Amino acid sequence: MNKAYLCVLIAGLLPYAGTMAAKWGFSRYDNHNPRQWLAEQTGFRARGNAAQANSFEAFPFFAAGVILASLAQVDAARLDMYAMVFVAARVGFIASYVADKAALRSIFWSIGLLSVVGLFAAALGL
């Protein structure tokens, strides 16, 4: 289960990859009013910000799945597998989002969602 817990930490930090994509190397970034600045961005910067928001939205569902599966004493290998698939899918999701690969992004999003559903199914003994 240590791998699954590590995956929760990684998943909690992943949204900041989107943040870095949105703000990286931009000399006119307005740190006094960052939300307004981000709202005015286009292209990969806007997509990086959207990837960040979606990653923050996905995180609680994943973390709850890991917690419930742990409490239900799901086999550690199964729990770790679902957690690692989720993290890998989210990395692919963020990269696809920033690169504007919409179909691939949707595939990664679906894989991440299915891995969380797998965690809940495992916790339910299914």
Image: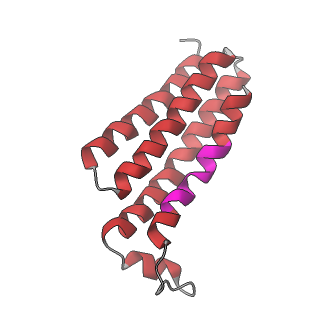
Q: How many marks?
A: 0
Q: Position of residue 84 (x, y in %)?
A: 56, 31
The quarter of the picture where residue 37 lies is bottom left
Q: Looking at the image, is 50 positioned above or below residue 121? A: below
The N terminus sits in image quarter: top right
The quarter of the picture where residue 10 lies is top right
For residue 104, side relative to residue 113 (left or right): left
Does residue 10 belong to the magenta stretch?
yes
Please state the extent of the stretch shown in magenta in the rendering. Answer: 9-18
Q: Position of residue 63 (x, y in %)?
A: 62, 39
Q: What main secondary structure does the magenta stretch of the protein show?
A: helix
Does residue 14 belong to the magenta stretch?
yes
Q: Residue furthest front?
A: 25
For residue 27, side relative to residue 122 (left or right): left
Q: Is residue 67 visible?
A: no
Q: Looking at the image, is 46 positioned above or below residue 37? A: above
Q: Is residue 82 visible?
A: yes
Q: Position of residue 27 (x, y in %)?
A: 48, 85
Image point 39% across, 69% down: which residue? 45
Image point 56% across, 59% down: which residue? 16
Image point 43% across, 51% down: which residue? 94
The colour scheme is secondary structure
Image point 57% across, 87% down: which residue? 32
Q: Position of residue 87 (x, y in %)?
A: 54, 38
